[in-house]
Image (tube, rainbow, N blue to C red):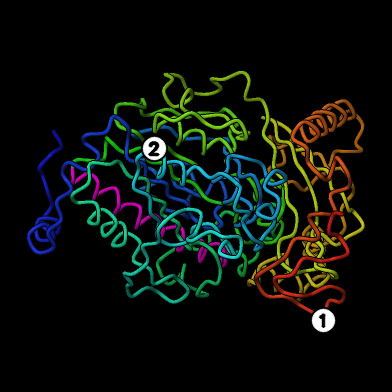
Amino acid sequence: MPSLRLNYHLFITLLLGGLSLLDLGAVSNHPNILFAISDDQSFPHASVYGSRFVKTPAFDRIANEGVLFQQAFCAAPGCSPSRASILTGRNIWQNREAGTHASNFPADLKVFTRALEQKGGYQVGYTGKAWGPGNSAITGWSQNPVGKVYNQHKMDSPAGISGNDYAKNFETFLKDQQTSTKPFFFWFGGHEPHRVYKEGAGVKSGKRLNDAEVPTFLPDHPVVRNDLLDYAVEIEWFDSHLGRMIRLLESLGQLDNTLIIVTADNGMPFPRAKANLYEFGIHAPMAVRWGNEVKGGRSIDDLVSFIDLAPTFLEAAGMKPWKEITGKSLLGLLKGQGSGITDEYRRWILSGRERHTHARPDNLGYPSRAIRTHRYLYIRNFNADLWPAGDEYHDIDGCPSKSLLLNNSSKPGFQKYFQAAVGKRPMEELFDILVDPGCMRNLASSPGYEQHRKHLAHLLERELKRQRDPRIIDGGQVFDSYPRYSSMRPHLGGFAERGKYNPAFIQK
């Protein structure tokens, strides 16, 4: 029997709003599911990982009472393709238009949220950012592929931070189910810590410049430190809403009946992080809690990918993943007893990117694929003659750290960071993550690493062929044909029609 212990706020809500949720999901043998995903947050930026300048008590609670993942990776270092891979359980090269940023979402792609709702008996909804940016309506979706939106409640928020009252919207979602015995799936998509930030917000909140942890791919400069502190403030805002949701579930006696997974869609919005396949672009924080179903206090070092989330949700709901899903359920890891490396078969993950913003003539992307093992990160850049950040560096979000590099690009102390962020890259890159997590020393042509490079190059190509990646099969120009529904930059030259397929690259 769910607990009847309610806090004062919820007691009043029950009396005045008619909210009766105590039996929510009680008839079902399957758990409620809360999936919380921040926008642009890198590993290890949560206090449970030891980060000094970010305080995340809600995330830490999930980790301490559940499982903390040390090696979780997004399928792409950008919002739309990463979120599409979460929904489909497939890598970006298997998702066609949805594998690029701000395109459309093919109607025939199966998503776990629709399966949970239509076949699993779940109530499904979301608040904040779901799949996007992009246009799903144009391909026939009646709503966002994630589900029904709950964004009606707003709140006063600091400058630069969304005014969406995520936690209140979650409460409204639950209120809509007051007569239902179905379990729920709810997607909490925070807009934080996506830019823009209120400059100086971190220091104003009481944070100290000395506490900021500057990655090795950025110069240790007060502008960068301030930028990092402002980023931390937004992570903490997301975490505060997560905390409110946890407390709501706890007050309703539903916390232990709810599978909670918390992560981020891709890495931090700084040069050489977001939109890059380097460590700070694809390595994400992740923690999971599920009452007595998951032994708490564990730290898992197995390599896991976001494509593993869809089959995890389906299996938890008592459903069998369909054959098109590439990912593998995490329930075996979650229901195990051990810490560290617990599954010897999870030896590597794949990630990739195509077009991010409109940053090059003809709206071309920067196609790359990566394979990450416990020690090494190998990257294959298919069009190494292109500028990785774009001809005008638009693939790097506008920010003080970027401006600092641009304004001092030729000065000693800045030049190497500027070139690392925007300079052309070789076809192959190899990094030893254990000694170089900032990915600043390319070992692909270094003596002593030839066997590692050859092995990972072979393994990557083998898997891409097996998954029928167009970049390996026939050059992959079809990716450059896909439309973009966000802003375009005609001055870059060539094809620049918003929402249109580029006829030069359409496959006959």
Q: Is residue 232 magenta?
A: yes
For label 2, the SS is loop
Q: Compared with residue 201, is residue 181 higher up or lower down, i.e. above or below?
A: above
- Of residues 177 and 367, the one drawn nearer to the viewer in this rendering: 177
Q: Residue 108 location, x and y as percent?
A: 61, 48
Region in magenta: 225-252
| Circle nearer the viewer, 2 or 1 | 2
Q: Is residue 414 magenta?
A: no
Q: Report the number of discs.
A: 2
- Of residues 386 and 438, the one drawn nearer to the viewer in this rendering: 386
Q: Residue 258 location, x and y as percent?
A: 31, 38
The disc label shown at residue 491, or none:
1
Which residue appears at 46% of the width and 58% of the height?
235
- Nearer-N-terminus badge (2/1): 2
> Label 2 sits on what residue type?
Gly
For label 1, the SS is helix
- Of residues 266 and 141, the one drawn nearer to the viewer in this rendering: 141
The disc label shown at residue 120, or none:
2
> Label 1 sits on what residue type?
His
Q: Compared with residue 24, is residue 339 higher up or lower down, i.e. above or below?
A: above
Q: Compared with residue 52, is residue 452 higher up or lower down, i.e. above or below?
A: above
